[in-house]
Amino acid sequence: MYDGAFRETRIRSTQFTILIAVAKSQPSSISKLASILLIDSTTLTRTLAKLQKQGLLTVSKRAERRQRFVNLTDAGVKALEESLPGWRVAHERFVKTVGADFWLGFRRELERLAHVAVDLDATDGESNLNPGSRHSIPAATKT
């Protein structure tokens, strides 16, 4: 559905998400972007290379602490400007179909689960979450 909204542009929905994250945090290190997007740096680096090849962003050479920074190019800004109206229409259709209350609750749960996954990854599978923390999974849903 979202890819269909971008049919007239030169980007896909996954690329749109990355371009939005870059636009909101630029200049941003690749590790910071990976953390924001909850994807590993290697996967993100491959996708950034494709976006760079399309001329939508720049990736700096390694700077201090071996970090590289990402910025949108003018073409990247234009691609977002062209894509945003289609995304809004598709998203409005999606929310209307599933219901706003359902969507907001579902999004909250996805964000919570993403934090749980990050916490678990950071502790190598050993959760140090307190049972009452905002990240804990209710006992009835644990497997």
Image (cartoon, rainbow, N blue to C red):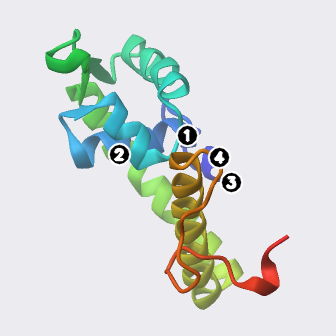
Image disc number at residue 14:
1
Left or right relative to 98: residue 68: left
Tell me the residue at 25%/49% (across/down). 24
Front one among 61 and 93: 61
Say whether marks 4 and 3 touch (CB < 8 Å): yes
Could you tell me the amino acid type at mark 2? Ala
Residue placed under numbered mark 2 in the picture: 21
Say whether marks 1 and 3 touch (CB < 8 Å): no
Residue 61 sits in which quadrant?
Answer: top left
Residue placed under numbered mark 3 in the picture: 1
Left or right relative to 57: residue 130: right
Say whether marks 1 and 2 touch (CB < 8 Å): no
Crowdedness near tag 3: few (<14), some (14–19) or many (≥20) residues, C-alpha within 10 Å? few
Say whether marks 4 and 2 touch (CB < 8 Å): no
Image disc number at residue 4:
4
Instruction: Give the Cα distance between marks 4 and 3.
Output: 5 Å
Could you tell me the amino acid type at mark 1? Thr
Left or right relative to 4: residue 73: left
Q: Can residue 43 be spotted in the picture?
A: yes
